[in-house]
């Protein structure tokens, strides 16, 4: 069963060696610590330190700025493996890459030279659009960046900020206001040491409990003009571009969660004896196992497909990114639920990993766009405009 879902993936020699290193780290350190970190809701600093030591914080930084970038395919394989071992650690790593993306893709040379080395030195990143009254409807956000003589004065509160309390650098989308006119959305680079920046409520979550989720408060926070990414008010296109890149990351995380549930179920079914034989020998359980494996394979191939498109330089892959995120997150929750069913009453208890894995699976259907939003994105791709 080991590496069943890695068959046929093309990686170069350096990427293969890195994957082996990641798998060894997951097996020996990250995986064994996952249950304790979840139970105690402890931020997995030990995992983050080890991840940085093997260079994973450089995988999404261009070589020109000191990084060691890999193909999108290799990145998603690595992210899947880490998420399989500990979903919380996977989402922390992914979130830092999400923070970097707008800087790498749309930032100025000066912004890249100033901020990207911070991540290579171990800084964590966060990104935020959501507010208490603005979730999927990002245009209704109220947090503002008001133009001043030498920068912007920022006020507002952001909610559900993954790693919001632990991040050193945050990419935050705000409404830009100049001369009493709202120009539109723009992302700003915010550092936690800025006056007016503070962390509010830390959420008590159902799953990915070792990954912190916090409220970020910006109160008369003065931000230099050179911390604005892109042209003032032109950030909605940046936001859409960012989501196209981030959704495959969450899809890979979801596949990792599904694989963890699947492997736990298969292991248990091969050991549990009922009616005189292992339960995996009962046809009903075999059918469940086969359906779980098939769903995971289908979801994973969707993720790899969008990775190939990105590696080949395709620019229009929004529908494929949403398809991957949709199927992978739905599969993660279904497979994790089936894994609990196979475990029976034991699956409902915290002594067995499937209870934690099931709780971790649900969020993949929500963040970076709910499953319903993914269906809208996909549906719009096939909706032709009517000429009048």
Image: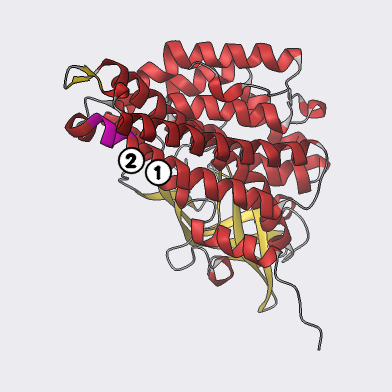
Q: In the rendered image, is residue 164 in sight?
A: no
Q: Residue at x 54, y 72 (%)?
A: 140
Label 2 Cα crowd, 10 Å radius (few <14 / some 14-19 / many 20+): many
State the residue in front, 89 or 127: 89
| Residue 260 position in % (x across, y down) | 42, 27
Q: Is residue 386 above or below residue 241?
A: below
In the displayed structure image, the side of residue 299 where residue 162 appears, left or right: left
- Which image quarter holds the C terminus? bottom right
Residue at which label 2 appears: 337
State the residue in front, 122 or 293: 293
Q: Is residue 295 above or below residue 268?
A: below
Label 1 Cα crowd, 10 Å radius (few <14 / some 14-19 / many 20+): many
Which contiguous range is marked in magenta? 339-343
In the displayed structure image, the side of residue 318 where residue 170 appears, left or right: left
Callout 1: SS: helix
Q: Residue at x 65, y 15 (%)?
A: 18
Q: Residue at x 46, y 27 (%)?
A: 84
Give residue 298's quadrant in the image.
top right
| Residue 151 position in % (x across, y down) | 70, 59
């Amino acid at each position: 069963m080991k590496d069943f879902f890695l068959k046929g993936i093309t990686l170069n020699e350096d990427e293969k060696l890195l994957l082996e290193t990641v798998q060894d780290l997951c097996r020996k350190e990250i995986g064994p610590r996952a249950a304790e970190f979840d139970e105690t809701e402890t931020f997995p600093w030990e995992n983050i330190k080890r991840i940085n030591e093997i260079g994973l914080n450089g995988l999404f930084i261009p070589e020109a700025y000191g990084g060691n970038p890999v193909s999108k395919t290799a990145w998603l394989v690595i992210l899947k493996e880490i998420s399989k071992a500990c979903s919380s650690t996977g989402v922390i790593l992914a979130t830092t890459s999400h923070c970097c993306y707008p800087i790498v893709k749309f930032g100025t040379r000066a912004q890249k030279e100033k901020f990207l080395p911070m991540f290579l030195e171990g800084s964590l990143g966060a990104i935020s659009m959501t507010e208490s009254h603005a979730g999927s409807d990002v245009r209704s956000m109220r947090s503002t960046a008001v133009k001043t003589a030498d920068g912007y004065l920022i006020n507002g509160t952001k909610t559900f900020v993954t790693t919001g309390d632990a991040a050193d650098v945050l990419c935050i989308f705000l409404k830009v206001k100049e001369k009493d006119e709202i120009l539109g959305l723009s992302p700003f680079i915010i550092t936690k040491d800025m006056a007016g920046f503070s962390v509010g409520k830390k959420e008590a979550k159902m799953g990915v409990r070792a990954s912190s989720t916090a409220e970020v408060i910006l109160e008369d926070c003065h931000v230099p003009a050179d911390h604005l990414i892109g042209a003032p008010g032109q950030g909605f296109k940046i936001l859409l571009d960012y989501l196209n890149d981030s959704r495959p990351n969450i899809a890979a995380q979801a596949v990792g969660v599904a694989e963890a549930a699947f492997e736990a179920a298969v292991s248990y079914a091969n050991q549990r004896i009922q009616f005189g034989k292992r339960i995996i020998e009962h046809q009903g359980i075999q059918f469940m196992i086969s359906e779980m494996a098939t769903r995971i394979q289908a979801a994973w191939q969707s993720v790899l497909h969008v990775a190939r498109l990105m590696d080949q330089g395709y620019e229009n892959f929004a529908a494929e990114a949403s398809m991957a995120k949709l199927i992978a997150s739905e599969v993660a929750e279904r497979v994790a639920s089936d894994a609990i069913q196979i475990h029976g009453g034991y699956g409902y208890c915290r002594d067995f990993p499937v209870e934690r894995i099931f709780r971790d699976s649900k969020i993949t259907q929500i963040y970076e766009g709910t499953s319903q939003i993914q269906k809208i994105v996909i549906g719009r791709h096939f909706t032709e405009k009517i000429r009048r």
